[in-house]
Amino acid sequence: MSKPKVFITRRLPTQLEQLGHIATIEVWEERQPAPYKVLLKKVKTIDGLLCLLADQIDQQLIEAAGTSFKVISQMAVGYDNIDIPAATARKIPVGHTPGVLTDATADLTWALLMAAARRVVEADRFARGGQWRTWEPNLLLGPNITGATLGIVGFGRIGQAIARRAKGFDMKIFYTSRHRCDQELEKVLGVEFTAFERLLQESDFVTIHTPLLDETYHLFGDRQFELMKQSAIVINTARGAIIDPEALYTALTSGQIAGAAIDVTDPEPIPTDSPLLSLDNLIITPHIGSASLQTREKMANMAIANLIAGLKGERLPHCVNPKVY
Ligand code: DGY
């Protein structure tokens, strides 16, 4: 019997030997994602797909998949690029990689918070640009981080990991979330559940850790920025479309907020002519929240484990749509 065929949409930071024992592997070797048309053709002939968040796995593509197609395995925890109801309707399990990237993402969030507050990127440009003439009492001042008030929007694994870091900085920590967490956990983390509006009004730093859903699309718009302190700094390492980019530009240029640091943009990648790119009070990184060596290897291995389980007709270890079983 011939081996099942799998398509992997980019070169992965791990070995494919184990997968190679049971499947014939094709890897998209380019740096840019495979064009949609290529994916559309591929799904007709493969048994499993290992994809990334930059691949659009929509209803049309899922419906085009051949009868032997068994599994979609995404190398990411988020899966807003995949039409889950369409996959479920075809009884195709979708795998993802929760847990292993929590700390790496929280670490980058913290790095961005500190870099934005203390103007690290601006200061680096300043020093390299030959502008460093002497020590100046008013040079590149930013707000205190220690003792400040932090608002965490979304309190899943990553939101909670942020709270653990903030505790070490003696911060007052608010969180808002669809569900209030266990009060024992609130006590341990030293956090207070509050309404979104109050969080916006009272926080010095607001950090976003909610998934992208219909309800969170452009959750941060003109009104939300208007509610915030003029000294506030916003950090987004979740999904770009949670912030309306035009509202962010207005907020940053009109002084409604002091600064922002974003690892994700809407659209992604950020267009090279985006006006946001001209702002000194905005730090932008290219969606590298989970980009530690160890984390990316774990994510790749987890995605392969999901893929293998799906090919064998076994339950995926980390399945987004268990309704298929
Ligand atoms: C995810 O996993 O959803 C991140 O955005 C990328 O690691």
Image: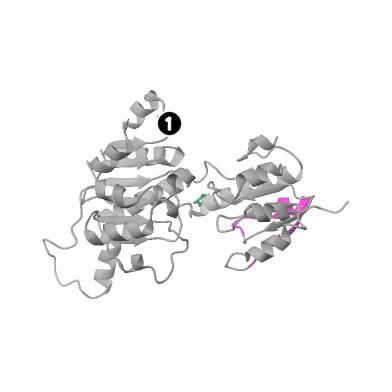
Q: Is residue 165 above or below residue 130?
A: above
With 246 as the anchor, is 213 left or right in this view?
Answer: right
The residue at 28%/72% (across/down) is: 128
Give the residue at mark 1.
Answer: 179
| In the image, residue 271 above or below residue 217 | below
At x 23%, y 44%, the residue is 146
- Out of 279 and 285, give the one closest to the viewer: 279
**Looking at the rendering, which quadrant does residue 155 occupy?**
top left
Image quadrant where residue 276 sits: bottom left
Q: Quadrant of residue 198?
A: top left
Mark 1 surroundings: few (<14), some (14-19) or many (≥20) residues within 10 A: few
Q: Is mark 1 within 8 Å of ligand 1?
A: no
Q: Is residue 155 left or right of residue 3?
A: left
Q: Amino acid at mark 1?
A: His
Measured as percent of width and height from the top left, residue 32 is found at: 57, 67
Figure check: 312 above or below 240: above
Image location (x, y in percent) of residue 261: 34, 56
Q: Is residue 248 visible?
A: yes
Outermost residue, left direction?
137
Q: Nearer the viewer, residue 118 or 16?
A: 118
Q: Which residues are magenta?
A: 12-29
Give left or right: position of 289 versus 189. right
On the image, the x and y values in percent for residue 258 come to 24, 55
Q: Position of residue 86 (x, y in %)?
A: 65, 46
